[in-house]
Amino acid sequence: GNSVTQMEGPVTLSEEAFLTINCTYTATGYPSLFWYVQYPGEGLQLLLKATKADDKGSNKGFEATYRKETTSFHLEKGSVQVSDSAVYFCALSDKSGGSNYKLTFGKGTLLTVNP
Amino acid sequence: GAGVSQSPSNKVTEKGKDVELRCDPISGHTALYWYRQSLGQGLEFLIYFQGNSAPDKSGLPSDRFSAERTGGSVSTLTIQRTQQEDSAVYLCATPGNEQFFGPGTRLTVL
């Protein structure tokens, strides 16, 4: 079956530090890959996505590249801000069941950015 | 998320009671998904609707859980004889390969 493994948190950084959150996946088909973010007290929001190998998703200064050879989709940001403090979830959808795009999530990584 | 509303936002119930959770998506989206987020299990898929049919119910944890969708729009997730382990945030999402989530219903079973 499908699975997503992301680095355990929590991750604590100082403002303007470089961020990497590792994510690897196992899938039976050709999945699309996502990063979702959950800010404190808020709902789950789509941060970025990539739908095929070598695609790079980007949003709000965050980037992730779909690496089929290493089955990875690591999240990076060059300079984090206090406002980036949140829980980040890596996820995949595998359209092996026709139009069913159900998501499989990693366990989430709590990021805290200190001023 | 924009376009998906859920009610109630919070629900506290006693063990053994039945609860109904509602999802009201933006009109026109034929696909609808239910997930739940709990401390122990993280984010997990429950059920997928295509129109009013549920071709994938594989994530429902027990036969106490059921869901329906009417008119290709509103969906209701029902949990019978609630247990403490049902305590979680229940999330609804549409439409398909780029899913947007509702704010969720936080269920607490005492």
Image (spheres, rainbow, N blue to C red):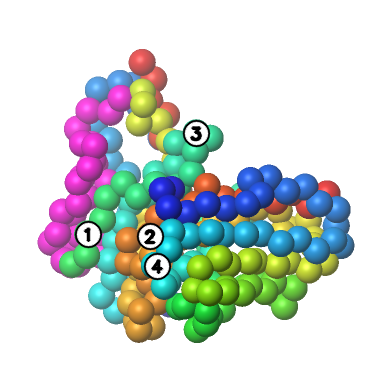
Mark 3, residue position: A40
Q: How many angstroms separate mark 4 from mark 2 (CA)? A: 11 Å
Mark 2, residue position: B99
Q: Type of residue at label 3?
A: Pro
Percent x, y of residue B70:
57, 74
What subunit carries mark 3? Answer: A
Q: Residue at x 60, y 56 (%)?
A: B90
Q: How many angstroms separate mark 1 from mark 4 (CA)? A: 22 Å
Q: How many angstroms separate mark 1 from mark 2 (CA)? A: 13 Å
Q: How many angstroms separate mark 1 from mark 3 (CA)? A: 25 Å
Q: Residues within 10 Å of mark 2 (few under 14, many from 20)?
A: many
Q: Quadrant of residue B22?
A: bottom right
Secondary structure of residue under mark 2? loop
**Which sits in the foreground, A1 or A49?**
A49
Comes first in the chain, label 4 or label 2: 4
Query: Which mark, by number, is residue B29?
Result: 4
